[in-house]
Amino acid sequence: MVKIEVVINSSVPFQSAGAGAPVNGHELSRLPKSAQLAPQPTVTHFSGWWKKTTSDVPKEARKGLNSLIILVAWEIWKHRNTCVFDNMRPNVQEVLRAISSEGGIWCSAGASKLQELVLRLPSEA
């Protein structure tokens, strides 16, 4: 089972979804189960995890996955800054909403491989 975790504080992981679980009307079941989408405790550098993760997926999905990783990292970073500088509490649901909204904007602006990746994911019935 593939798990996606959003870590607000390294000691408090928030599990948001697993393989086959709907995420904004889509499922993650099309991604290889061997892909570690959540960095493991043994991974010390984001770049090393990113390289390993993208090497585990089919070549035709890599550009879309790279865009997705950049999008998620960007939205987590922006949310972190809001928490630090505007004294807001961390909110996983808000980060997921921001990822969905910004992802739609990216696709409209021409992120075709991200759009292909999202469209290849089966829709929730």
Image: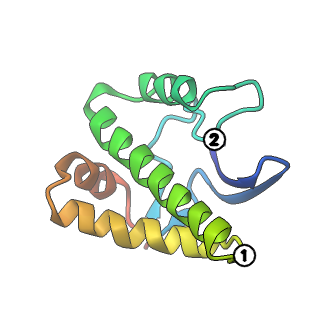
Q: Is 107 situated above or below 7?
A: below
| Residue at (65% x, 36% y) in the render | 39
Q: Quadrant of the N terminus?
A: top right
Q: Amino acid at mark 1?
A: Arg
Name the one closer to the observer, 61 or 100: 100
Q: Is 116 situated above or below 61?
A: below
Q: Along the horizontal axis of the image, is 55 left or right of 60?
A: right
- Report the coloring of the rendering: rainbow
Q: Along the horizontal axis of the image, is 65 left or right of 2?
A: left
Q: Quadrant of residue 21?
A: bottom right
Answer yes or no: do the residues labelled 1 and 2 have beta carbons within 8 Å?
no
| Residue at (29% x, 68% y) in the render | 104
Residue receiving disc 1: 89
Residue receiving disc 2: 38
Q: Position of residue 17 (x, y in %)?
A: 63, 59
| Residue at (37% x, 54% y) in the render | 121
Q: Position of residue 124 (x, y in %)?
A: 44, 70
| Mark carried by residue 61 | none
Element under disc 1: loop
Q: Position of residue 14 (x, y in %)?
A: 74, 59
Q: Quadrant of residue 2?
A: top right
